[in-house]
Image: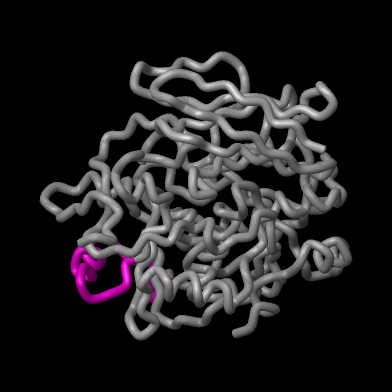
Amino acid sequence: MSREDVLVSAAWSEENLETPGVVFVEVDEDTSAYDGGHIPGAVRIDWKTELQDQVRRDFVDRAGFEKLLSAKGISNEDNVILYGGNNNWFAAYAYWYFKLYGHTNVKLLDGGRKKWELDGRPLDKEEVVRPTTSYKASEQDASIRAFRDEVVAAIGNKNLVDVRSPDEFSGKLLAPAHLPQEQAQRAGHIPGAVNVPWSKAANEDGTFRSDDELREIYAEAGFDGSRKTIAYCRIGERSSHTWFALHELLGYDDVKNYDGSWTEYGSLVGVPIELGSGKDA
Amino acid sequence: MSAAGCGAPAQGGAVAVSETETVVSGRVVAGGAPVGGAYVRLLDSSGEFTAEVVSSPSGDFRFYAAAGTWTVRALHRTGNGQASVEATGPGVHEVEIAVA
């Protein structure tokens, strides 16, 4: 797998806005971003109301995903280009989610909405309607999604990559610094986890760092390329960004995203938690 | 999970800050005029990225941080800029960033 198979540049995207079979999809949690101006022709997917089950804490099921993509006018053959705000966190999450349900031809717009805006590329407010399709999803690919028991069992034998900020990792903060801090769960990290904040994988403009830079960043943090890996953050979107870097860009083949992440782990009764930077242990 | 995901709440407006929270708040300006839609990054004392928000139409931004010395850096298609702020403890710490 090469970078060209999983990432497209903003320049390529602008040249392919009207290419048949290429569908741009904006994925955000804050949908007002899309309403304020989106890439011309892009449809939107709401991370919270469309990708999450609205009762249980889980994803929409296979039939639900089929219904969603059919209604959005996305077909199995389409080349889906995902982008969004927050340095592509939710777009990366959607990328992983599309892969989970077996969509083969999906890519991320490198740098997402930020790079697009900083480049001064066009946005419009036109309503986008695509003809409905009959989308068929696969069963979830269990090889890229980790659940809690597997995470507890991985302590001491797999790479656990905590991609939150150092202050969240050490237990000083419970959420990223752009959010209020009232949370129910305990602070800290999974014992033995290495802390490689997702942001290390990105340049200031939101694009991914080069493969060589990425390899160096993970090696420096104590990531062992010969081991299996589970990435986690707070709710699983920042770790999707890192899952993308490790699995899609660097090609490590056994990398899972733990979407339960700290909001699940930090609320479990009886599991071990480590505080501090973890480097002195 | 918590009520919100990981997206930032609306920037600007009045903010209720609990007694324990340390907030870094401010405005992005260019030639004295507010700059909305700038990407504002909160960097810790070692220059490490901590958080990012997009400034409101009135140029406002806000971070829930911890005590310490922070750099706030704004990126906008018209230019970039940064400023330093000393958050001594709980409360709201104001800072202005000029971009050019």
Residue placed most toward the observer, A113 or A161: A161
Say which quarter of the image contains residue A222: bottom left
- x and y percentages locating residue A206 in the rendered image: 65, 56
- x and y percentages locating residue A172 in the rendered image: 32, 40
Residue at x 46% of width, y 81% of height: A252
Residue at x 35% of width, y 85% of height: A226
Residue A150 colored magenta?
A: yes
Check the image and report above or below for B6 versus B26. Answer: below
- In the displayed orientation, state which residue is furthest to the left: A270
Check the image and report above or below for A184 versus A100. Answer: above
Is residue A101 visible in this depiction of the protein? no
Q: Is residue A93 left or right of residue A254?
A: right
Q: Quadrant of the C terminus of chain B?
A: top right
Q: Is residue A248 left or right of residue A113?
A: left
- x and y percentages locating residue A201 in the rendered image: 55, 64
Q: Quadrant of the N terminus of chain B?
A: top left
Residue at x 49% of width, y 61% of height: A240
Residue placed most toward the observer, B10 or A213: A213
Residue A63 colored magenta?
A: no
Please state the extent of the stretch shown in magenta in the rendering. A141-160
